[in-house]
Amino acid sequence: MNFDFDNMTPEMIEALDLTEKAHKLIENDAFDAAAQALAQAEDIEPMCIRIYIERGGLYALQDQYDEALAEYEKARLIDKNNAEVQYMMGNTYLLKAEFTNALEAYRKAEEYGYRSPFMVNNMGACCEQLHQLDNANAYYSEAARMQPDWIEPRMRQVNVLMIMQKHEEARSVAEKAVQDFPHNSQVYCALADVLVVMEELEEADRLLETAMTNVVDTKTIMIKQLNVWYFLDQFDRMQAQIAKLHEMELDDEEADIVDQAEGELDLRMEKPDEARAAYERVLSREKPDNIRVETRMVLMTIYKVMEDYANLRKLAVSSLNTPMADSLLCSGYAMEAIAVQGLKQEEEAQELFRRALMKYRVLSIRNRDRMDVHVYRIMCHIGLKEYDKAGEELDYVEQILGSSGMTQQLRVEILKGQGKDVEASELEAKLHQGEDDD
């Protein structure tokens, strides 16, 4: 920033020198020394706005967002129309996930004369989180135009267009990104995802083969190929690729994707022991701030099918005691009861089934259209041997969703419980025939 030193007091000049020193210290992660320099500047000239802007940035870097905002408010007392202050406030609100406040701050910065591709991109991110998808799309498009050599807004725009189910537009943006960044693996992966959703699997496969010769980061492309080959039923290629990837150095996120792909493949190939091992590897990398919701749900299903009720109960109970997605909480209630019943603790199981039904009753009152709640209610009714109620609930689910392998398997359990063994056997035979055809 340029300053008119000719019209400044000596105190202001000295304070600005100290804020410049603090800025350089912050860039070098010398936070304590930077704080001391800013405190010294404030003692010399408390009306220097740079003190509060730099200190706000210092607090934000240390995840002290409320303290950062308090500093920016001090800056606003000196100059309420300062665009940089509003921009910094917007960034801080975004980090706090207060997207409405962030958007308001960015718009004030715009009003006061500041506009950059980074701010416009952040405005798109706020709108995306607020489900204002048309606005998000417009902001990402503008950010990309403002800085054509920046990939992030284009990738965000592709994602938003996919959410909006504007697949042709998403494809167009992704194809342009591939043209502009032919050596970047991220753009190929984004276009491949669009093509998969559009069911143009062969084209997605050819695209990724091309990417393997164009990009340096071939590992990312190799991982993406697993997804395409899964949908193409090219299981031999998947197995060979997974073996290669296991020999590479993978970070936790990459290892999760590879292990999940291996688990899905093993389930398709009816190898439950191998699938279990793959999903357990994913779960072993779980951290408190990154609960593996889908992995837990799949593993609970595997334990149930394998009749490993001890591990099923352990995982269900830990899921109920972990901050998590609502869908995981739903499965935990029923799965704990099923596990206890499998462990031959019938009295406790009956109590758990009844308690789970009460939980599901509340959830279904809030949202009757939640089909996962109805499925778990069916499981509970089966566990309580209330087969007629389970059948009525299943009729409702199939009326909404149609029949599937899962609902037919539940139907088999209900028919057996009702003593309709012939009907159950006939349906079971059809299920096995369908699996053989697949």
Image (spheres, rainbow, N blue to C red):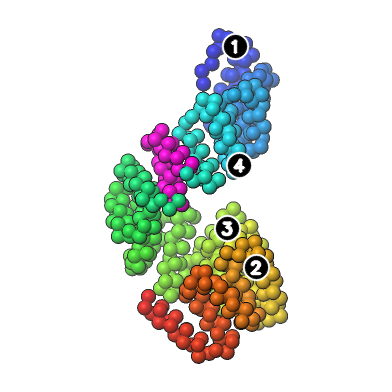
Element assignment for label 1: loop
Look at the numbered discs 1 and 4 and tell me whether their residues touch, using CB distance below 8 Å: no
| Distance between mark 2 and mark 3 Cα atoms | 22 Å
Magenta span main SS: helix
The mark nearer the N terminus, 1 or 4, is: 1
Look at the numbered discs 1 and 3 and tell me whether their residues touch, using CB distance below 8 Å: no
The residue stretch that appears in magenta: 135-163
The residue mark sitting in front, 3 or 4, is 4
| Amino acid residing under circle 4 | Glu
Q: x, y percentage for residue 132? A: 52, 45
Rendered image quadrant of residue 394: bottom right
Q: x, y percentage for residue 182? A: 31, 44
The answer to whether one can see residue 294 in this image is yes
Q: Assess disc 1: are there few (<14), some (14-19) or many (≥20) residues with their C-alpha within 10 Å of its C-alpha.
A: few
Which residue lies at the image location 34% right of the left edge and 47% below the top edge?
A: 172
| Distance between mark 4 and mark 2 Cα atoms | 31 Å
Q: x, y percentage for residue 341? A: 64, 79
Residue ID for mark 1: 8
Residue ID for mark 2: 360
Residue ID for mark 3: 291
Q: Which is more toward the observer, 331 or 166?
A: 166
Q: Which is more toward the observer, 437 or 415?
A: 415
